[in-house]
Image (cartoon, rainbow, N blue to C red):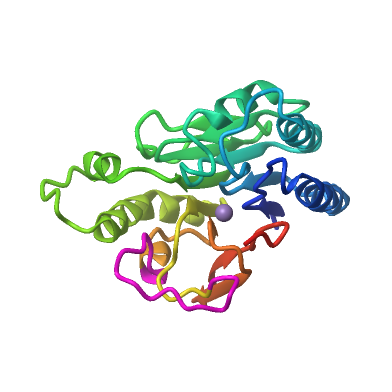
């Protein structure tokens, strides 16, 4: 069994700093104790644009660096208002014993036998890379045009949810091939799953949500790790699991 820690929606900021940092520190301690082989931070590491001199930047960086001293770290781009594009770039420089990979585009990422990261040059690998330890399929927050360009959609008016469904199904063949080779497959995304419950207990049943459970299961990954909704909840289908971990500090 491969043990991977998921952290999400840390929302580091001046206002949340004490709680965010205390909770993230504890979660990292626990992950290290449990000897996880990799760590995923599935978006919204920060709450809003932060200046580099903000204490929250230093505290977040310090903890990500500590995590990377234990295992490889995958950071996914979250909501633009919380994590303006470019925010995560600096974390690529933070590798400790292990590297921090920042997924800010639609891509597949291989965790290799020597516990390094290799990203697909296109949105997915053409074939299962050799010496693979875990295969990640990443769908960060992206704008509609990016999704349309990736799946080659011609109908620009098509709902983003439909296009993401097509995209996720595109990951299925390679995930299934990896699965047959005994390689764990994991999806990581940031967005709303249709029908999920918010931290206030409100069901999200609008038509403009990014994902359905069916679309996520369609990627044929063994586990899907979405971020965005701050309440822990999960769905299971024929041994495949989708789980929001919830916000680490329960920020609303
Ligand atoms: Mn969030």
Query: Is 208 inside the magenta-drawn segment?
Result: yes
- Residue 124 in the image: above or below residue 202: above
Query: Is 160 inside the magenta-drawn segment?
Result: no
Query: At 56% from the left edge and 47% from the top edge, which residue is drawn?
Result: 43
21 lies left or right of 188 = right
Indicate which quadrant contains ligand 1: bottom right
Q: Quadrant of residue 215?
A: bottom left
219 lies left or right of 118 = left
Residue 177 x/y as whole percent: 42, 51
Residue 85 x/y as whole percent: 47, 32
Looking at the rendered image, the quarter that the N terminus falls into is bottom right
Q: Which residues are magenta?
A: 198-214
Query: At 27% from the left edge and 40% from the top edge, which residue is drawn?
Result: 150
Q: 94 or 208, which is in the foreground?
A: 208
Work out which residue is located at the far front of the displayed protein and give it: 15
Q: 92 or 4, which is in the foreground?
A: 92
Majority secondary structure of the magenta segment?
Answer: loop
198 lies left or right of 219 = right
Query: At 45% from the left edge and 57% from the top edge, which residue is drawn?
Result: 191
Q: 43 or 116, which is in the foreground?
A: 43
Query: At 31% from the left edge and 51% from the top edge, which residue is drawn?
Result: 167
The answer to whether residue 206 is visible is yes
- Residue 229 in the image: above or below residue 171: below
Work out which residue is located at the far left of the displayed protein and give it: 154
Looking at the rendered image, the quarter that the C terminus falls into is bottom right
- Residue 81 in the image: above or below residue 231: above
Residue 6 x/y as whole percent: 66, 53
The answer to whether residue 182 is visible is no
């Amino acid at each position: 069994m491969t043990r991977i820690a998921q952290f999400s929606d840390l929302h580091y900021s001046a206002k949340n700093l004490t709680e965010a940092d205390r909770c993230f520190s504890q979660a990292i301690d626990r992950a290290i104790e449990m000897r996880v082989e990799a760590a995923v931070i599935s978006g919204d590491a920060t709450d809003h644009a932060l200046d580099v001199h903000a204490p929250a930047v230093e505290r977040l960086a310090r903890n990500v660096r500590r995590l990377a001293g234990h295992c490889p770290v995958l950071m996914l781009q979250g909501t633009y208002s919380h994590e303006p594009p470019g925010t995560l770039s600096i974390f690529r420089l933070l590798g400790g014993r292990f590297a921090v990979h920042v997924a800010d585009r639609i891509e597949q990422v291989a965790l290799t036998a020597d516990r390094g990261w290799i990203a697909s040059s296109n949105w997915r690998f053409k074939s299962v890379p050799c010496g693979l330890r875990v295969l990640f399929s990443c769908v960060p927050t992206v704008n509609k045009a990016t999704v349309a360009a990736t799946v080659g959609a011609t109908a620009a008016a098509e709902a983003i949810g439909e296009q993401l469904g097509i995209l996720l199904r595109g990951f299925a063949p390679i995930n299934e091939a990896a699965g047959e080779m005994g390689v764990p497959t994991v999806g990581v995304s940031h967005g709303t799953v249709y029908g999920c419950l918010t931290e206030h207990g409100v069901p999200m049943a609008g038509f403009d949500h990014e994902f359905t459970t069916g679309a996520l299961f369609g990627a044929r990954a063994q586990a899907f790790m979405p971020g965005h909704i701050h309440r822990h909840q999960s769905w299971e289908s024929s041994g495949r699991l989708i789980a929001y971990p919830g916000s680490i500090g329960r920020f609303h």
